[in-house]
Amino acid sequence: MYRLLLVIALLVVLYFLLRRAFQGFKNGYMDGRGTSVDQDQMVEDPVCHTFVPRRAAMIEKVGGQTYYFCSKQCAAAFRNRQAG
């Protein structure tokens, strides 16, 4: 009887682990660390402080850090501000 309860408990845990793993694939792609990355996540432009979806943002790496911008003009203004 205890073996049956143990097997049922293990199957329930396995079910929830598999369900969580498949939800990650369904909701967005998985990055190298196994975490879900949602391309529709809103990111803030550091220049004009507007929010844009990550997939539509202009991406710039400045000083080893990644920044997201709403336009090329905001990215250029940020680079100029960092240089000066």
Image (tube, helix red, strand yellow):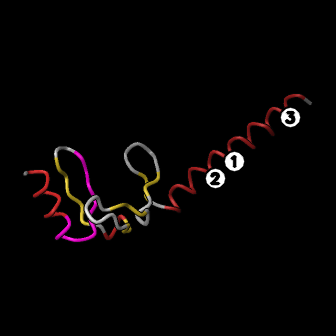
User: Which residue is pictured at 29% across the width and 67% down the height?
Assistant: 57
Q: Is residue 66 magenta?
A: yes
User: Which residue is pictured at 81% across the width and 32% down the height?
Assistant: 6
The image shows residue 66 at horizontal and vertical percentages of 25, 51
Of the pair 4 and 63, the residue shown nearer to us: 63
- Dot 2: few (<14), some (14–19), or many (≥20) neighbours within 10 Å? few
Q: Is residue 51 left or right of residue 67?
A: right
Mark 1 sits on what residue? 15
Q: Secondary structure at mark 2?
A: helix
Residue 66 against residue 39 in the figure, above or below: above
**Measured Cα–Cα span from mark 3 to mark 1:** 15 Å
Amino acid under label 1?
Tyr
The image shows residue 74 at horizontal and vertical percentages of 20, 66
**Furthest residue toward right:** 1
Count of residue discs:
3
Q: Is residue 71 magenta?
A: yes
- Dot 3: few (<14), some (14–19), or many (≥20) neighbours within 10 Å? few
- Asked if marks 3 and 1 touch (Cβ < 8 Å), the reply is no
Q: Is residue 76 left or right of residue 32?
A: left
The image shows residue 23 at horizontal and vertical percentages of 57, 57
Displayed quadrant of residue 49 = bottom left
**Measured Cα–Cα span from mark 1 to mark 2:** 6 Å
Amino acid under label 3?
Leu
- Asked if marks 1 and 2 touch (Cβ < 8 Å), the reply is yes
What residue span does the magenta drawing correspond to? 65-74
User: Which is more N-terminal, label 2 or label 3?
Assistant: 3
**Measured Cα–Cα span from mark 3 to mark 2:** 21 Å
Mark 3 sits on what residue? 5
Mark 2 sits on what residue? 19
